[in-house]
Image (spheres, grey):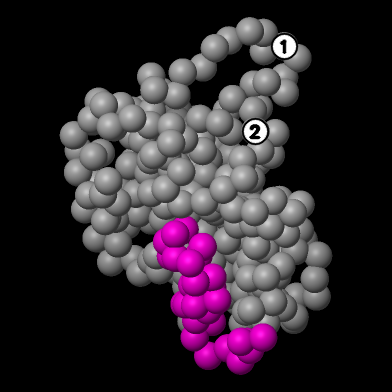
Amino acid sequence: MGLSFGCGMQVFFIVGAQKSGTTWLQKSLNSIEGIHCLGEGHFIDKLVMPMTQTRYDYNQMMQVVQQRIYEGEGFYEPVPDQEFFGLMRQWILQIMIRNAAAPTESILALGDKTPANSFHIPTLKRLFPGARFIHILRDGRDVAVSAFHHRERIQNESPQAGAINLDLHKEAPQLLARWAGSCRAVKKAENLGIPVHTVRYEDMLSDGVDSLRNCVSHLLPQSSISDNQIEAAVATNSFQILSGGREPGTISTESNLRRGQAGGWSDELPSEVIEGCAPEDRALLEELGYTA
């Protein structure tokens, strides 16, 4: 069942490695009436984790006060889990609803797409027991290439960056390892019994309507969202539209949407570079069906 905040809206989170297509999926879902997918809230790393430390420090201090001043008969008890997680839940929901900028009663599903969510699925599930998760999966080699050029573009745009030569071949193993870490975190959550719907970037390219329909069905199994709405959302968020008219495969080094194509890694990563990556990360590629 969906979590309620004055109505029966479904809370959800998009997870996946950075540059896997999380923003594309976010925009596609956000184009469907009643679904509001925001990003990137960074609720766990920037709100919950710091507040968890604050709560710990507070509880420790209260114990000291109770023992040293009131001889074990103090007035303030430690902040319990239920109260803490309840406060965090309400705070996050208030932030999400405020930024959705829509009447609460019109929201069917409310989501966030922070890439780091991949590593916090159990915590998000504890905060929102009824939450649903969508994992967007992309070939780790394409992710590594895209992440490299994303960093390169940002550095080139910074006037303080100076002349630093980045080397894709040297950085590829580390970038692939980050992708693998995200994938393993999602798998770990699934092994804990948390249901996660996985949609592949490559399937979104080849059959966007079916891919998006399956995502919507996961979020809202009983919804009456029409095929026309799904088709319109896919068309509105095609690479050609979002990139300002470029065809998939046409590279722009200045754009966050650099290529919009599957398998482009093969133009930039020789086989010896892939062979130099960690064996366990190469094994994960193969396990997930991403073979040369």
Identify the secondary structure beneath mark 2.
Answer: loop
Residue under pointer 1: 160
Q: Residue at x 62, y 79 (%)?
A: 230
Identify the secondary structure beneath mark 1.
Answer: loop
The residue nearer to you, when weighing 83 against 269, is 269
Q: Earlier in the sequence, mark 2 or mark 1?
A: 1
Residue 107 picture location, percent across and down: 70, 76
The residue nearer to you, when weighing 169 against 224, is 169
Q: Which residues are magenta?
A: 199-228
Instruction: Let me know if residue 220 is in the magenta part.
Output: yes
Q: Residue at x 47, y 58 (%)?
A: 201
- Total marks drawn? 2
Which one is closest to the eye, mark 2 or mark 1?
2
Residue 130 picture location, percent across and down: 47, 73
Q: Residue at x 29, y 51 (%)?
A: 290
**Disc 2 to disc 1, how far (Cα)?**
19 Å
Q: Does the magenta stretch mainly form a helix, a strand or a loop?
A: helix
Give the vertical position of 127 relative to 76 (above or below).
Answer: below
Residue under pointer 2: 253
Give the vertical position of 188 relative to 164 (above or below).
Answer: below
Residue 71 picture location, percent across and down: 42, 35
Amino acid type at circle 2 is Thr
Q: Residue at x 52, y 44 (%)?
A: 19
